[in-house]
Image (spheres, rainbow, N blue to C red):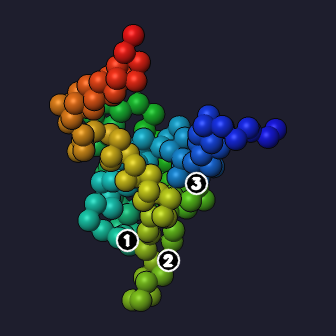
Amino acid sequence: MEIPHTAIGGALAGAQRAFERPTLTLLHKQSAPLVVAIFASAFQGRQSIGVEQLHLEVPDLLAELTRAGTPDVPDDPARVLCARWVRERWLIKNVNDADEEEYQLTSHAQEALDFVARAGGARSLVSESRIRALLDAVDHFAQDANPA
């Protein structure tokens, strides 16, 4: 079905393109919040993690989530989870210059983590007063455009 060339048609086409990106596919998965939390913790300040190191860290992170009462924490072994994350395109498994296997986040996974960090409110770039000022300005312009 052809979308008409209107403002809403353009907005819909842009939204459809965005939702076809692998980043949003990853974030749409039911397990995405848990995986993002694990990667945000494990990869903090690191571009890559040795395979065995991540296999040691994942159970500790899962145990911490379980102790905190997080529902639906998987009890699969770290190797199984990491293999799943490679298949799902969250992780890439490489061999580094020292001939050691390591995991890296895919570009889509990194983009997903960045998006969640921005959207999660950890560091709001727009303050409440700035939003109020913008709303007041929009209201002022609307009144000027239609003074009735």
Task: Kindly identify which residue carries mark 2.
Answer: 94
In this rendered view, identify the residue nearer to me: 63 or 146. 146
Seen at 41% across and 30% down, the residue is 71
Sequence-wise, which precedes: disc 1 or disc 3?
3
Q: Position of residue 141 (x, y in %)?
A: 34, 27
Q: Is residue 6 above or below residue 37?
A: above
Residue 4, image x and y in percent? Answer: 73, 38
Which residue does the numbered mark 1 point to in the structure image?
48
Q: Quadrant of residue 69?
A: top left
The residue type indicated by label 1 comes to Ser
Tell me the residue that label 3 is attached to: 22
Residue 88: image location, x then y, percent: 58, 55
Q: For the residues carrying marks 3 and 2, which lies nearer the camera in this image?
A: 3
Task: Compute the Cα span from label 3 to label 2.
Answer: 20 Å
Q: Are marks 2 and 1 in contact (CB under 8 Å)?
A: yes
N-terminal label among 3 and 2: 3
